[in-house]
Amino acid sequence: MSRLDQIFVLLGHWLAGWAPVPVRPLVSAVLAIACIMLVFATCFALTTLAERKLLGRMQNRFGPNRVGPCGLFQPVADGVKMLIKEDIVPFSADKALHFLAPIVLTAPIWLAFAVLPFGRNMTAIDLDAGILFFFAIGSASELAVFMAGWSSQNKYSVVGAMRAIAQMISYEVPLALSTLPALMLAGSLSLNDIVAAQGSYAFGWLARWNAFTPWGLAGLLLFLIAATAESNRSPFDLPEGESEIIAGYLTEYSGFKYALFFLGEYVGLFAGAGLAVTVFLGGWHAPVKGLEWAPSWLWFGGKFAALIFLFIWVRATLPRLRLDQLLNFAWRFLVPLSLVNLLVAAAWYWSGAWPFGAAAPIRWVLCAALFVFPCHWLGGTLRGPGALPRKYNYAE
Amino acid sequence: MNGVGIIKGLIETARNLAGSYHDKERLTTVRYPEETLPPVENARTIPFLVYDGGDAAAGLRCTACTICEKECPPQCIYIVKDMAKKPDYLGKMQLHPKVFDIDISVCMSCGICVEVCPFDAIKMDQVFELSTDDRFGGLLWGIKQLAKPNDYFQKLHRTEASEIDARREEDKSKSQAAAAAKAAGPAPAAKPPPSANKGAAA
Amino acid sequence: MLNEIQFLLCASLTLAGAVAAMMLRNLVHCALCAAGAFAGLAALYLQLDAEFVGLAQLLIYVGAIAILIVFTIMLTRGEEIRPGVPIASPSWWVGLPVGALVLACLIGAVMASPSLVRLPAGAVHAPVRKIGEALMNGYVLPLQTIGLLLTAALLGAVVISLREPRNPESKTR
């Protein structure tokens, strides 16, 4: 089945073959870009629909089901609505910044897909420091949030923008730190190397995904929490919660600019999910040796879809965090736990050289305990005073 | 243990998701207008006029006594009596309305007109899809739109309609028995019996 | 040829950003143009195949320092930005000889350096592995010192922003 596995690569080569030799690299790069943008834009449309329908089902109601069969044309209707809305710019707004903010937010996020390996030999650009590129791009888009909030000349926008930036820079630290054990043990910053390091099979049949190790599982959870916060998604959507701050830095945006912000947020989520799949869930590898016949891009897509479902599920379940709870959670829980995760990864690595090395359960339990106890203790420090005993004042 | 509450919440949402496909309890949405909620017997929106039998003109119970017009708080009923009398279900000659208009945009569904009607002629309907784009008369309903058969009344308010029908049957049979007794009865007294007119015309 | 065009583009972007950061009236615009200059610098690093440095420049300068600058502007002088104030002080001509002197020093230093005339032997590779090994083996003392410095700065920031101790009977935190 390797023909099916490499079908996109072969297709790309064939199409680029039609171009004259000097511009062939350019043409193949443009093809890769066009393909990625098409796929993820469609994914965006389908995700908005899937999110609304799944949220509906989880909240005991139907999602959109009027526009097209099962509501499949709802994203089209939303797109048309966004396009024909009047584009209102406040009178005293900083016009240049107000215009540039959605562009500066959305454009760099697409760059993050350049380094993700979508399948065997299917990375757009194989950078030596791929994961650093990814984090750099993620942090470059935070300035746009400030631009959006400041240029609106609106107190709520500015407060919302400040909160959003504080949240995003706070959660960047656990985002990067939680992937650090995987980088350490793979020995490289290149995402292709990280995926290749998860390629062998333990016990002959179970893949060596990072998520099957205690530090990998912990890292995956930390990463997913940080990715949810990075893209301002429930339960971390304080900057744009309607009941909190009237859409925060998005208040003064309408029509297509709002759609661009929305797009940027979702594409950021996709990039985060893609990185989680790559670093922790084995990239395009199958989970068990018997299922290797399925195409690699299909495995990537399946794991990606599962993570998106997880994000939607968490959104439907958890209430919004308050700002101080959010920041405390980042700095006093996630960051120390990421550092502890490094220790756990180191312990795992060194205990791999144990003479009774096949005693994997003991090793797993010990390393997991090394993580669980600090987790429990740190969670205890985060807890508030709890319900104080009531003081009743009786009339005399 | 940390995170237990989150896990419990996630399980509950997952049960909602799974249950929404097969369990009616989990997904209680009624997809209006294809599906409607089952009607409740005591619901009410606007009044309607009841008529017996198949013919709205002949069987209309309303006798244009105008009690409902006088009692209606927002005064949305307008009645013009037709002086030609027609027999009612007991055979007695009664007036009937030539014009009976209710402005349903004014009606406040209080049901006072129903409470005061002595003839069980006006009852509360349950229709709510009343919007129209005719601003100047679309919400002013006359007899043609207000008159609905007794079977419809039975469907809406089963207990009340059955009780009224039973009472009317009893009245009818009593008057028929009285008329038969009078017709076959002994010597006409000095005063002709008042129920002589109530023949078998009902 | 392509290299020259790339270099000119990146350099002009950087210079334009830096000049705008000096000359614009609105302080927030200046800060954002400075961020643009940082991004141009990162592009220059990437053009020289210094992947790690270029991406770290993006991550740290654009992703953290630019945000720090705008936060500072927001939280300190936000209300006092008066766009009508003239950007050049009355004694602007003093800057000309000073600028010329600095330029002469820089040009002299660059021209006199041997690396300008000596072409590199082959393509210079700076893969991340080599940088890591160099940091951990040869440059470990500067690395640890910088780490200590950063820790001290972080602790200092926390101490500065710490609230005064509350009176003991209020238990709310």
Image: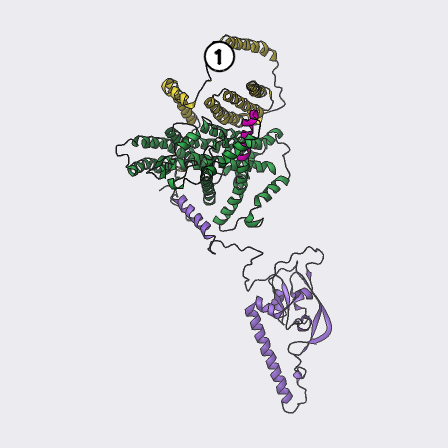
- Is residue A85 or residue A111 the one in the foreground? A111
Instruction: Tell me which secondary structure the magenta stretch mostly adopts.
Output: helix
Count of marks overlaid on the render: 1
The N terminus of chain A, quarter of image: top left
**Residue A306 in the image: x percent, y percent?**
45, 42
Percent position (x, y) of residue B77? Answer: 68, 64
Q: Mark 1 = which residue?
A: C119
The residue at 49%/36% (across/down) is A7
Task: Give the residue drawn at x 62%, y 30%.
Answer: A95
Q: Residue B106: name its quadrant.
A: bottom right
Chain coloured yellow in this rendering: C
- Residue A320 appears in the picture as rendered: no
Query: Magenta stretch?
Result: A21-36
In the picture provided, is A196 more to the left or to the right than A50? left
State the image coordinates of residue B32 (x, y, percent, origin top left): 57, 55
Closer to the camera in the image, A132 or C4: C4
For the residue labelled by badge 1, is the local secondary structure a helix, a strand or a loop? loop
**Chain A hue?**
green
Protein chain holding label 1 = C
Question: Do we see residue A376 in this rendering?
Answer: yes
Occupied quadrant, residue A107:
top right
